[in-house]
Amino acid sequence: MEVHNRKSLKEIRRNLRQESTLAEDFLWQHIRNRNLNQLKFKRQHSIGNYVVDFYCASKRLIIEVDGVVHGLADQLEKDKSRDENLIEMDFKILRFSNEEVLLNINFVKQEITKHSQTI
């Protein structure tokens, strides 16, 4: 069974890349082209039925950048279920708020570095 970048999700991935948030774009500028510890990240990568914001295959590391909607009760429950499913598939997930990315990018980069070294 195809797990990564299913063809059925190709259009969704493309649309998400074209409509990325300011925080996603900002983080992407810091982690693309192996800019962070030579880690290769892909953006809007699908795993199973989920499309993740950023993915590093060598570390099985997923990075999510969450806006305000992720603080709502029903979205929190969806995120929890999604994270549990991805963790069961042996992926590590880091979540950052838009504000963390935009206001404290050095902290975000340090956390990504720290977690990528423990994997």
Image: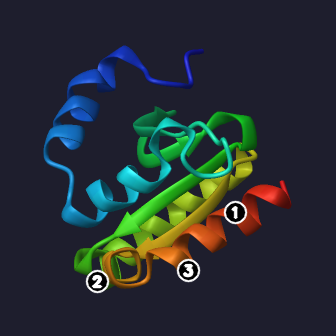
Residue 20 spot, x, y in % from top left: 21, 51
The residue beneath circle 3 is 107
The residue beneath circle 1 is 113
First of labels 3, 1 by sequence position: 3
Task: Identify the amino acid type marked 1.
Answer: Thr
| Side of 115 where 93 appears, left or right | left
Residue 17 spot, x, y in % from top left: 24, 40
Q: Tag 2, which secondary structure?
A: loop
Q: Which mark is residue 31?
A: none
Task: Calculate the distance from the C-alpha at mark 3 to the C-alpha at mark 1.
Answer: 10 Å
Residue 44 location, quadrant: top left
Task: Calculate the distance from the C-alpha at mark 2 to the C-alpha at mark 3.
Answer: 25 Å
Depth check: give the residue in front, 15 or 75.
15
Residue under the image location 39 percent in, 74 percent down? 101
Q: Is residue 49 visible?
A: no
The residue beneath circle 2 is 72
Residue 46 spot, x, y in % from top left: 44, 34
The nearer-to-camera label among 2 and 3 is 3
Residue under the image location 45 percent in, 23 percent down? 5
Residue under the image location 55 percent in, 16 percent down? 2
- Badge 2 density bin: few <14, some 14–19, many ≥20, Cα 10 Å: few
Task: Identify the amino acid type marked 3.
Answer: Phe
Task: Identify the amino acid type marked 2.
Answer: Leu
Depth check: give the residue in front, 104 or 48.
104
First of labels 2, 3 by sequence position: 2
Q: Tag 3, which secondary structure?
A: helix
**Can you say whether 109 is above or below 25 in the image?**
below
